[in-house]
Amino acid sequence: MPWKVTRGAGAWISRLRLSGRAAEANYGSWWNAIASTREGAYALTYVVDDEEDYRTRGWYGDANSFGAKQLLEMGSVGRESRVLEIGCGMARIGREMAPHVREWHGADISKNMLHLARERTEGMDNVFLHELPDVSLGLFADESFDFVYATIVFMHLDKEDLFQYLVEARRVLKPDRFAYFDTWNLLHPDTYRQWRRTQESNIGSHKVRGRIQFATPVELRSYLEDVGFDVLRLDDDKLLRALCRRGPVRSHEPDDGRPPFGYIDVPRNGGTVRGELHVEGWALDDIERIEVFLDGSQRLGEAQLGRPRPDVAEAFPRYSRSASCGFVLDVGGTSPPSGRHTLQVVATDAHGAATDLAGNYRTFVFGT
Ligand SMILES: C[S@@+](CC[C@H](N)C(=O)[O-])C[C@H]1O[C@@H](n2cnc3c(N)ncnc32)[C@H](O)[C@@H]1O
């Protein structure tokens, strides 16, 4: 693809609309139609029809997608490793990664994509390509890979199918080994706008099969932890990028030693605040205090902890305090001046690890 949210997105999305028939297609037939020509496959797995440039992107990645270089490092992958890519497309990454590993396996639901991958990896005897019959990795044995990843694939799947691949990815991964996944972040303002645009063309039964879909950071984390991954890193810019390690399927995890995480329900990102500023949300993982700041520096106060959150308890049952992980702060006194402001909500845990729950882009407008 890679999909430029700001520049190329419109053209890319309109390619995704294709014909009315696309709405009825299954994953395989939809992607086969795309990859029935090399130009079509390039267009949806990249932006231009230029093999040399494509190879560079396969190694270095670009703004929206990691390449083999980063994935080898993130996955602690070496010469003895057996690696699996889910949704490998034309082996953009695999072609560049294969010389650095023992076996690179590319699995994809589109036989046309795999045909192009085969052409691009001809003569590479440690490349193995697999056509997936459905949304499962049933072709592969339990605990048989050292690294499993899927990039620019999950944003084309329904949530149920994304979740199923996570279950399967964990199953085929060896214990304690790494996995990497990404998808678009619904909560980033740019990607949210993009979702609103595609939402209009995907109502009722007229859904484009390969349309772009989105997830929230909390949602993705919840899926990953639910299936038994430890989330080591979750970047939540436009793209949600998750580096995980296969862990045990846990029944209870009150404090895992990693920084806190959570969500701000109020004020709404980009929303308008009138009257007193009220901040409300939830945070998990051994929280000691939550401090709220305005515009990067002005401390507004410390939130009151321990508010009931049965909804969070349901989503994160392994965290012992999830049922009472809500927080609230009513900021009295002088109101901020009218106009746009940023909010920082810093949750600190018992070990001093801190997370700004507001991320980089939580803004609100104060209006009287
Ligand atoms: C945008 S391309 C990305 C290809 C490759 N990961 C890359 O980064 O160049 C998406 C790929 O996902 C594959 N795909 C789509 N739905 C799939 C599914 N349900 N199961 C497996 N692969 C799927 C498509 O056939 C296509 O090759």
Image (cartoon, rainbow, N blue to C red):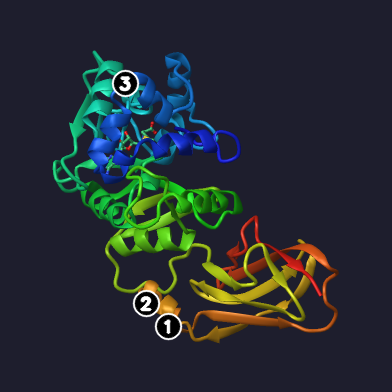
Q: Judging from the image, what secondary structure is the residue with disc 3 in?
A: loop
Q: Could you tell me how far apart the alpha carbons at marks 1 and 3 are, in whole angstroms? A: 51 Å
Q: Residue at x 27, y 64 (%)?
A: 249
- Percent coordinates x, y for residue 71 in the rendering: 42, 36
Label 1: how many residues lie within 10 Å, few (<14), some (14-19) or many (20+)? some
In this picture, residue 85 sits left or right of residue 217: left
Which residue is at the front of the view, 6 or 22?
22
- Residue type highlighted by circle 2: Glu
Q: In the rendered image of this protein, does residue 257 appear above or below residue 332? A: above
Disc 1: which residue:
310
In this picture, residue 213 sits left or right of residue 101: right
- Residue type highlighted by circle 3: Thr
Q: In the rendered image of this protein, does residue 96 appear above or below residue 157? A: above
The numbered disc on residue 340 is none
- Percent coordinates x, y for residue 173 in the rendering: 25, 47
Label 2: how many residues lie within 10 Å, few (<14), some (14-19) or many (20+)? few
